[in-house]
Amino acid sequence: MFIKGLYISWLDENYLDKAISAGIDTFFINLDDGSGKDKIKALFQKYKSQVNLIPTAAYTQPGKRLPENEQFFDGTKYFPSTPCPTNPNVIFKLLEFPLELYRDSLCNGIAIDFEDYGWIAYPDLVIPYFSQWEEKEWQCKCERCKNLTALQQRVENAELIKDQLGGIPLYHLPIVDSYIWSIGDCWLNEYTYEKWGAWDRILKNTNRMKDKGITTLNLSGLWLEKFTAKDYLERVEKVCKSSSTDGYWIYAQMRMSKNCYWRTHPNDPYSIESLKAIPYHSYIDDPNSVDSDANFFEKLKLINSNIDEYRSGLWFSIKRWFSSKFR
Ligand SMILES: [Zn+2]
């Protein structure tokens, strides 16, 4: 089953409905978009019969200061926004709301975003714990961790997450880390956000993990604000035809949301800075913008409706056999 996903950073039901009409079958819902729990629950209630719903929680949040006994301690210094890897309470709190949604039969799996947000801008708050899982032995030396090696701490961290999930499918993004991959079911791949290359962006990574005996599904992410509507649709089609891919997910910040913070607060320095990094700001189906296409969702629907037929053909099965050597 080829997954057709949408990750929308700031929720806008108008565009969620348009996505469903175009054949999108899975929503990744950012739990930190500021809507609050009640609104998110109501949203899940509304969409649960229409699509698969995956709440997405960020492991590291530079805006959040943890209590000292939950912080990473390198022996000299505490990092207030980096969790101690072996503290069960951290994992409990991270997954508390997603698990509540799951218990209420409102979601089909749980996504954890393991990006070390803020480690470049706020090196006193955040360390690149997951991104540097191989390069550096990040060892927490707090009371709880002091007798464990860096490696034992990583194993313990993955075990704690696995235990909390209790068998619920884990969607993991964006890092390629063997500890996290070993407990995950589906990789939300960000290497495909802007550039394409089945080997460079997908198989090189899945092959490294396969060598360690770890496999996972690959969902290729495509960043909506980095393409014109025309180029984006071409890219979606290309991804759908790739045998290295089990699905795609639209990563949308502002082109599918009237509630995007940068849209609602255009004069905030954060907005001004963020918008510099993304070339296309218009709504994706804005009839008055040359970068958009008023028929974007109709065209996406057409691509989506042809995927299964293409992927059941002989040529595809040959390609699939070849790529299966690396994933
Ligand atoms: Zn610790």
Image (tube, rainbow, N blue to C red):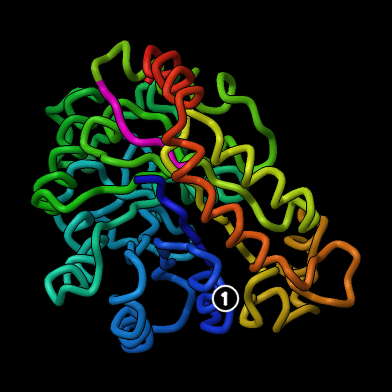
Is residue 279 magenta-colored? Answer: no
Residue position marked by numbered label 1 in the rendering = 18
The residue range painted magenta reads 214-219
The amino acid type of the residue labelled 1 equals Lys
Q: Position of residue 98 (x, y in %)?
A: 24, 67
Give the residue displayed 64% in from the left and 76% down from the top.
261
Q: Nearer the viewer, residue 229 or 95?
A: 229
- Element marked by disc 1: helix
- The picture quadrant where one finds residue 129 is top left
Q: Position of residue 2 (x, y in %)?
A: 40, 46
Check mark 1 vs ligand 1: CB closer than 8 Å? yes or no.
no
| Quarter of the rendered structure image containing ligand 1 | top left
Is residue 217 magenta-colored? Answer: yes
- Count of marks overlaid on the render: 1
Q: Position of residue 235 (x, y in %)?
A: 68, 43
- The picture quadrant where one finds residue 180 is top left
Give the residue displayed 77% in from the left and 61% down from the top.
273
Horizontally, residue 191 falls left or right of residue 180, namely right
| Position of the C terminus by quadrant | top left
Horizontally, residue 60 falls left or right of residue 170, namely right
Give the residue displayed 55% in from the left and 67% down from the top.
22
Q: Nearer the viewer, residue 281 or 271?
A: 281
Residue 291 vertical position relative to residue 325 in the rendered view, above or below = below
Residue 223 vertical position relative to residue 107 in the rendered view, above or below = above
